[in-house]
């Protein structure tokens, strides 16, 4: 199984940016993810169309099960 933590942000004009983190820690809490996203927003490390992201839109863990046939 492959897990990915997908974080979605938006800038002031509503344009969105998605950041994916491979193999996130198993016991993540909503509070931890929200706090981390807020830190990323405050640090202004991400931008969309030269505008820094200003809000967190969503966070989800995607769990993929791949069965290789050959």
Image (tube, rainbow, N blue to C red):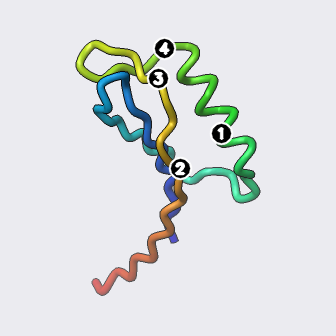
* Residue at 36% from the left image edge and 22% from the top image edge: 12
Q: Position of residue 66 (x, y in %)?
A: 40, 76
Taking the view exactly as shown, the residue that stands out farthest to the left is 49
In this image, 34 relative to 1: left or right?
right
> Mark 2: which secondary structure?
strand
Which residue is under mark 1? Answer: 34
Which residue is under mark 4? Answer: 44
Q: Position of residue 48 (x, y in %)?
A: 29, 23
* Residue at 53% from the left image edge and 49% from the top image edge: 59
Residue 66 vertical placement versus 31 (above, below): below
In this image, 30 relative to 15: left or right?
right
Q: CA distance from mark 1 to mark 3?
A: 13 Å
Going from the N terminus, do you reach mark 4 or mark 1 first? 1
> Mark 1: which secondary structure?
helix
Toward the viewer: 1 or 27?
27
> Mark 3: which secondary structure?
strand
Q: CA distance from mark 4 to mark 3?
A: 8 Å
Which residue is under mark 3? Answer: 54
Q: Image quarter for residue 36? A: top right
Contact between labelled residues 3 and 1, with CB atoms less than 8 Å apart: no
Mark 3 crowdedness (10 Å alpha carbons): few <14, some 14-19, many ≥20? some
Q: Position of residue 2 (x, y in %)?
A: 49, 65
Q: CA distance from mark 4 to mark 1?
A: 16 Å
Going from the N terminus, do you reach mark 3 or mark 2 first? 3
Going from the N terminus, do you reach mark 1 or mark 2 first? 1
């Amino acid at each position: 199984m492959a897990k990915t933590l997908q974080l979605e942000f938006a800038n002031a004009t509503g344009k969105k940016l998605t950041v994916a983190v491979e193999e996130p820690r198993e016991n993540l809490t909503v509070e931890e993810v929200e706090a981390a996203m807020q830190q990323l927003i405050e640090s202004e490390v991400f931008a969309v169309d030269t505008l820094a992201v200003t809000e967190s839109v969503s966070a989800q863990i995607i769990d993929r099960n791949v069965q290789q046939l050959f």
